[in-house]
Amino acid sequence: MEEKLVPEIEAIPQLESIYVFCPNKAVHEQWAKKIPKVKGVYTEINPICEALQIDCEQCDRATISIKYNATDPSFMYTLLLKEALLEIDDDDNKSIEILTAYCRENDIPGNQIQRLEREYRVHTPIWWYTTPYFLYSTLNRGLRLMDVEIILKMGFFIRQLHQDIQKLHDEQRTKNIITDSPLKLYRGQGLSLEDFDKTNKSIGQLMSFNNFLSTSLNRNVSLNFAQQALKDSNKVGILFHMIIDPTICKKSQIPFADVSPVSYFKGKEAEILFTTHTIFRIDRIKQIDHEHTDRLWEVNLTLVGNDDHDLNELTTHVREEINSKAPRRGWSQLAFILLKVGEPAKAENIYKLLLRKELSDIERADYYHKLGWAYNNMGEYSKALSSHEQTLEIQQTALPPNHPDLARSYSNIGIVYKNMGEHSKALSSYERSLEIQNIALPSNHTDLASSYLGIGNVYHSMGEYSKALLSYERSLEIQKIALPPNHPDLATSYNNIGNIYDDMGEYSKALSSHERSLEIRKVALPPNHPDLAQSYLGIGNVYYRKGEYSKALSSYERSLEIKKIILPSNHPDVARSCGNIGFLYKKLGDYSKALTFLEKTHDIFKTSLPPNHPNVAKSKKDVENLKNNM
C-alpha cells in the first residue's frame, strides 16, 4: 500500500519531506530510493525525530537571502527599514497581539502561537529565534522577499533580537570570549543550481546576507547541514568557510555573539549569530571530496565592511535624505522609507497615527505633506489635494513668505492638479514654486530639478513637446550635479525624456532613454517598485510605435504584473496598462481580448478619476469604437 500511496502524495507542492516508519526496513528501502522526497526509512521513532530536526533547520536555512555583488537594492532598503525599526520603542503586548493575529490568518500552527503569547517574556529573543518555531522561518522569508508587511509586524522582534545579540556581544567582549583575533566560522546549507552558478561566477566579488546569519565554530556540524541538502537533486551542498575580523564588525556596527549557552539547542551547534546585513568577499570555491557525490563544495568568504560596496554611495545619500526630510527618528522615518519603497498605503496608516499626537505646526504640516504624497501615489487625488492644501495653510502662517517649504507645497499641489488633468492650475502652482526656489535656493538644488520636472510633465500632457523636453533636460542637468549616478530621480528624468522622444517619433532616442531609466531603477529600487513598471511601460510604448508587437506585449505585461502587486486594483496606472494591452490586441486583430482590457480600463478610470477627467470620456469612447468594429 505504501508503495502506491507515497508517489501520489509526493506531488503535493507544499510537502517537503517524507519519512517512512515501518517494522521491516529492508522491505521498503528499495522502492523508497526511487522517490526523491523520501528522506529515509526508519524502524524507530527517535531517529525520525532527529532527522526531522535537521531537515526542518535545513529547510529554514534555504529561506536565507543571499545577494551577489551587494548591489541588490533590497539590501539597502531592508537595512534602512531595520535602522528605523531599531529606533521605535513600542508596547510588547500590542506588538505580540498584532503578530499573532497575522499568524492566525496565515496558517501558523495554533500551539506555537499560544506558546508565544504565554511565554514570550520567559525566554530571550535569541532563544525564540533558535527555536524550531515559525519566528525563524517567517522572519527570514520576510527579509528575503522584502515583504514589508512581515517586516513591520515582526519589527519589535527584529529590534529586540538585534539588541539581545549586541548585549551578549558586549558581555563576551568584557570576558574576552570575543577578542580582536580573527575567527574561522562555518555555515552549511543547500543552494539551487542557479544560485551556485551565480556564486561560481562571482569569485573576487561581494555577496551579502540580508538576514540574521547563523554560523558555527564546528566545521563538522556545518558540513552535516551541507550534506543534508544533497537529498534534493536540484541543490548543491555548500559549506561556507568564513574569515571574520571582529574589528571590521565593530566599525560597521555588525554585532555577533556565541549564542550556544542561551540558544534553544544549548551548545549542540557551537553557534555564532550575526545581526543582519553582513557582506563578504568570495575568495575561492573548491570541491569537497566525497565518495558518493560531486555536488559538495566549500566556498571561502572574508567579511568586509559595509562601506566597501558599490551601493554604499546611494545608501549614504538615501540615509541623509531620510534624516533631512524625516528628522524625527522612529515611526516618522519608517513611514518615509515606506513611501520610498512604494508602500503608500502602509505609510498612510502611520501618518494618520502620527497626526493624532501633540505636534508643532511645522511637524503637523510635514505629516500632512507626506500623507498627501501617499494619497497621490495611491491615486486618491482629492484626498491628496486636501492634505497638501492643509500643509500650505499651516506654512503660510508659520513661515516667511519665501521659505523653501512653501515652494515644495506649491510643487506638490501642482503634481496633484496635473494628475487630475487640470493643467493650467498645475502650471500656475509649479511656476509659483519655481519663483520661490529661485529666491531661496542655490541654482543646483534638487528642489529646482523637481519643479522643472513637474513643469515638463504638464507641458507634456498639453502636447507642447519642445517646452517639455527643455524642462526635463534642465531637471536632468541639475540632478547629474547634485545626485549619485544611480539615484532613482535620474531614472525618472530619463523616463520622461524617453516619453517625449517617443511622442516626437524619435524612437531610437526614446528607447535609449527608457533603457537607461530601467538600468538605474533595477540597481536603485526594490524589484516590484511602481517606477520599474513605468519603465517597462515606456519601453513597451516605443516597441508598439515601431510595430514590434511581441516585444511591446512582453513589456506591457511585465509592467501590469508589477502594478497588480504593488498598487490598489482601481489605481489609474493599472487602467493605463490595461489600456495599452487592449490597444495592442486590437492591433493584432484579437478583438475579444482587446475588449476585455479596454472595458477594464474604463471601469477603473470611472471609479478613480473625477467624472470630467478626459480619460473617463476617452476610455468610454475607445470601448464603443471597438464594439462598432466587431
Image: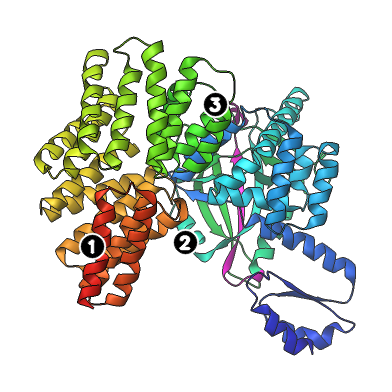
Q: Position of residue 221 (x, y in %)?
A: 74, 54
Q: Classify residue 444 by image quadrant.
A: top left
Residue under the point 42% across and 30% down: 387
Residue under the point 68% across and 81% down: 35
Mark 3 → mark 1, Cα distance in angstroms? 43 Å
Q: Position of residue 324 (x, y in %)?
A: 43, 22
Q: Residues within 10 Å of mark 2 (few under 14, many from 20)?
A: few
Please give the residue where the numbered disc 1 appears in the rendered image: 621
Q: Position of residue 330 (x, y in %)?
A: 58, 27
Q: Nearer the viewer, residue 525 or 270?
A: 525
Read off the magenta span.
231-252
Residue under the point 54% across and 63% down: 192
Please give the residue where the numbered disc 3 appears in the rendered image: 355
Q: Is residue 166 left or right of residue 430?
A: right
Q: Position of residue 371 (x, y in %)?
A: 46, 33
Amino acid at dot 1:
Lys
Circle 3 SS class: loop
Q: Is residue 131 above or below residue 159?
A: below
Q: Nearer the viewer, residue 354 or 221?
A: 354
Q: Is residue 133 left or right of residue 69?
A: right
Examine the structure image and report whether residue 247 is included in the region drawn in magenta: yes
Mark 2 → mark 3, Cα distance in angstroms? 50 Å
Q: Is residue 50 above or below residue 148?
A: below
Please give the residue where the numbered disc 2 appears in the rendered image: 197
Mark 1 → mark 2, Cα distance in angstroms? 52 Å
Amino acid at dot 2:
Asp
**Is residue 439 visible in the rendered structure shown here?**
yes
What is the count of numbered marks? Answer: 3
Q: Residues within 10 Å of mark 3 (few under 14, many from 20)?
A: some
